[in-house]
Image: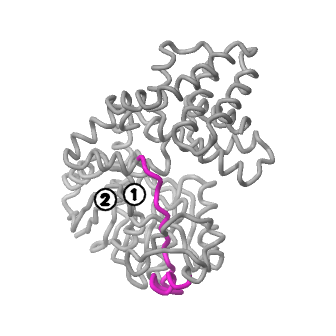
Amino acid sequence: MASIQSLAADILGRIDEGRTLTEALDAAFRRAGDLSPSNRGALQDIAYGSVRHLAELKFWLRKLVPRPLPEPAIERLLLVALYQLAHTRAAPYAVVDNAVREAEKLARGKFKSLVNGVLRNFQRQQSELAAAAARDAEAASNHPRWWVDRLKAAYPNDWQSVIAASNAHPPMTLRVNRRHDNAAGYIASLAEQGIVAEALDDSAVLLAKPCNVRELPGFAEGKVSVQDWGAQQAARRLDLADGQRVLDACAAPGGKTGHILESADVSLTALDVDAARLERVSDNLSRIGLSADVRQGDAAKPETWWDGVPFDRILADVPCSASGVVRRHPDIKWLRRPGDFAELARQQAAMLDALWPLLASGGKMLYATCSIFPEENRKQLDAFLVRHPDATCSGDEQLLPCDRHDGFYYALLEKH
């Protein structure tokens, strides 16, 4: 546990430097070397949990130690230990003892007694500290205050449920490859393995509790994929048909790409600007046994990759704040800044304007984000329709995160 505590504390430090949780966790795994599978899982759980509850943990720490310590590494160690004491089943004496041992290795051990005292005080005062945190907007929501304010403005009746969903553990949803089976048939296969699940539609399956993909029957053979139900709406809304020429404009990591190919026999171009991430697209397509023209290129600069032949369908799954998938990536809420949205909106508008001429007359483009903020969604759509009088919107929908899906926005645009 001691090494896991220090690794988790180091992850918090890397996030403070602007690294993503995924990057920081990968770096921790490399640093640790040969962690056992159970310890890797424990480190991931502690790292994600600490980041998910970061505002609450920092609130408690300042109540216990009013002034920031001169050693940030000690503060991060305390945050991790507080998370373990409050939110895990780890034995409290072991958490405290190991934190003290770790503190002894830092700053020549001069904060060893402080760490012991702080954690002992937390154990004695936990109920009072929890009540105080519940009265603080940021600590209670575990989101930045500006984020909560924006949610309140956008969703005055739903912001609390959005916060609750964003702080919860994400559901594990599967997409059954309809070329092989349907939801009902696959649920029967899961039942044979003792895995409980329910159908959300004819190809979406929600597991009662997450499991390793190696436990899923037919996963290696491409009979099923892991994909959030909200993300599965993209291919469904594209109005796909056999023989169409389709562009997936920001394809990586390839979940929506695979779903498009499973849905209809189309000629698909899977485009992404990141060559490394495109490898994941190819890997995913290889697993499900389907193919596309996987191509590196910037969707905002089609002159560098487009062959001049119009597309019947375009999926414009544009870069965004990812505010709808915070429960899967809790670092997002701490890494984002209020000023980010203007630049994101500019990028989104540029991409939409660049892709629109590639769409055939009568064709359809689906604008998609995993954001819940109107600046990236409805406001972006309204501005696009003003700029392009040859476009009509046949429907748009904001999906807010809930117990069945993450947060997504979709708007289907038709060219006339």
Q: In percent of the image, x 39 and y 57: which residue is there?
A: 406
Question: Which amino acid, by three-letter code, is at mark 1?
Answer: Asp
- Percent x, y of residue 63: 45, 20
Q: Position of residue 393 (x, y in %)?
A: 22, 64
Relative to 94, is 293 above or below? Answer: below
Q: Which mark is residue 329?
A: none
- Which quadrant of the figure has residue 354? bottom left
Q: What are the residue bounds of the magenta stretch?
A: 167-189
Residue farthest along the right direction in this orientation: 34
Residue 82 in magenta stretch: no
Vertical side of 123 occupied by 314: above or below: below
Report the residue at 41% width, 77% height from top. 199
Mark 1 lies on a secondary structure that is loop
What's the residue type where badge 2 is placed?
Leu
Please name whichever residue, 340 or 397, is drawn nearer the observer in this view of the structure. 397
Q: Quick check: is 169 in the magenta stretch?
A: yes
Residue at position x 70%, y 30% from top? Answer: 97
CB under 8 Å between discs 2 and 1:
yes
- Crowding at label 1, few (<14), some or many (≥20) Cα neighbours within 10 Å? many
- Residue 367: image quadrant is bottom left
Residue at numbered disc 2? 399
In the image, is 74 to the left or to the right of 313? right
Colour treatment of the image: one colour
Query: What number is the disc on residue 406?
Result: 1
Quarter of the view holding residue 215? bottom right
Q: Residue at x 71, y 48 (%)?
A: 39
**Quarter placement of the C terminus:** bottom left
Secondary structure at numbered mark 2: strand
